Every structure is written in C-alpha cells, then in structure tokens.
Image (tube, helix red, strand yellow):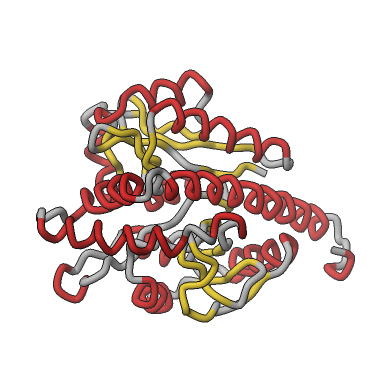
Amino acid sequence: MFLSMLTLYNTNCRNINAHGLAWGSFHNLQTAKEVQAILKANGAVPATIAILDGVPCIGLNNEQLERLAKLGSKAQKTARRDISHVVASGGNGATTVSATMFFASKVGIPVFVTGGVGGVHRHAETTMDISSDLTELGKTPMAVISAGVKSILDIPRTLEYLETQGVTVAVYQSNDFPAFFSGSSGCKAPCRLDTPEQCARLIYANMKLGLGSGMLIAVPAPEEHVAAGNAIESAIKKALEEAKVNNVAGNAATPFLLSRVNELTGGASLLANIALVKNNALIGARIAVALADLRRSLKNGQPRSAL
C-alpha cells in the first residue's frame, strides 16, 4: 500500500518541514529518511511528494530528497492555489497538506502521514486566516494521519470548521482530541478508533460511500514528550504576541511561529515534533497495511468478521 508522507521546504533561512518542523537541513533530511525507513519497516511504501523543475514528483528518491533539502528557501511553499504557478514557471515547490493531498489522490494513494494539519488561526474572526488544508479535507477523499492540528492554531474553531466541511475526525486510542504537543486539547474526540483495522474500516467505508470528503485521524503525541507541552504552550503564546507586533501574517505566520517557538523552548519543541512525526509514521503505516489487507480480503470474498 503506497502511503504519502511529509515533504520539505524552507523559509526564514531554515529548512521547515512542509507540515510543521523547523530544523537545520541535515536534521530535516535525516528525519525524512528515518520516517521513510519506519514506513518501509512496517510494510508501507513511502511516496514523498514535491514539485521539481515544474514537474510534480510522487515518490522522491534519496537524490531528490537531498536536492529539495539543499534548495532551502528557493523551494516555494506550495499549497493548492500555488500548484499551477509553480508548474507553469518550471519552479520547485514543497507541498503543504492541501497540495500533497491533491497529488496523492490523483494517483490513488489513500493514506497520508504528516506532523499536523493547518487550521483556523487564532483571531481568525478578524483576519480570516484559515488554512486551505481544511477545505482540501472537505473535498478530497483520503485519510490524513497527524498529531491533530498545530497547537499554534485555534483548535476548537478548527474542529467546528472541519465539521462544516463534512470531514470525519477520529482520534486514535483516546477520547480527547490532541493539542499536537499535548495529549488533550480540552475538546472531545468526535469518534475514537483503537486499532489499525478499525481505522481501515472507516477509510474503506468513506471510499465505498463516495462521500467525496476526507478523514482526519489524530494520533496523540508519545507520552514521554507530553510533559514538555506546558512549556511549549507558553512559548506559543509569546510567539503569537511577537507575530502580531511584527505584522507577520498569511503563509509566513506558521514558519515564523514554529521557528520562534523552537528558539524559545531551546529546541524542546523540535525534539517533540520529530518524535510525533515518527510516531505518526508508525501508526500510519499500520493503518495503510490494514487497509490493503481489508481490500484484499473483501476482493477474495472473505467475511469482514475474519479481520
């Protein structure tokens, strides 16, 4: 089972994972390779996505990964709205969740692993800053496995917006929706799934019903990294204040906030981020394999109770 995964881009003179990691290029590239290794070790086939020289590439090899990491800020952060421009200009683009979902769905990849999806930004009632990841989830039928939404965002409003978009939201082995670095955001999980097989049945049902919308399966961060959550949350509040003072908004906001939070926490947010991405990859691979097994068994006429 092919499984789409994280891509890389750079803003603010740092390599930033397209779904939320701020780090040096070596660590960025190294973590991408380690995540691919986790996927392969658990039976999934990684298909990292980017645009290189105007050509959408699905399933980057090591040479292409290294090139993308070295491009740094020369690789454009590419959401759905930017795809046509990057392709037409022959440019290089590091795809966000929305663009990655678009490309993955075109080739039939049903499962996508990332760190966290974008969402409704805090104070969006005045800025109208809402990530295109949410509308993409509303119209692209694939499963996104993440640690929820980035904790720099307004999580309750993001969940409300996902409900409006008709997106199925589930939490893996928890009754609480995670706050990225923390196991609970204070929001109740719309539904709970406890095994990869249950996740696979949800994905399969969505596909067969033809709902046309995606699914967000949130995986709480590993327990050993949750303790740093309070310190990280304090850093987030400070970074948000700085962003407001410096008029940082739009697609520059997330890279700025993540980079600043990493500085304020002395790298603690980076370590926690890497850990949760790897954990998401592990769970995502198991879900992808369970989905492949489910499809195979149903094709062969085996009863679902045998799963």
Q: Position of residue 238 (x, y in %)?
A: 25, 60
Q: Say which residue appears at 55% left-offset and 55% top-offset.
A: 225
Q: Is 189 rendered above or below residue 18?
A: below
Q: Position of residue 262 (x, y in %)?
A: 35, 46
Q: Say which residue appears at 87% left-offset and 70% top-offset.
A: 305
Q: Position of residue 39 (x, y in %)?
A: 65, 40
Is 244 situated left or right of 210 in this image?
left
Is 307 situated left or right of 4 in this image?
right
Q: Say which residue appears at 36% left-offset and 27% top-offset.
A: 52
Q: Position of residue 275 (x, y in %)?
A: 55, 47
Q: Is 56 rendered above or below residue 78?
A: above
The residue closer to the viewer here, 170 or 84, is 170
- Quarter of the image with the C terminus is bottom right
Where on the picture, by quarter, is residue 50? top left
- Quarter of the image with the N terminus is top right
Residue 161 seen in render: yes
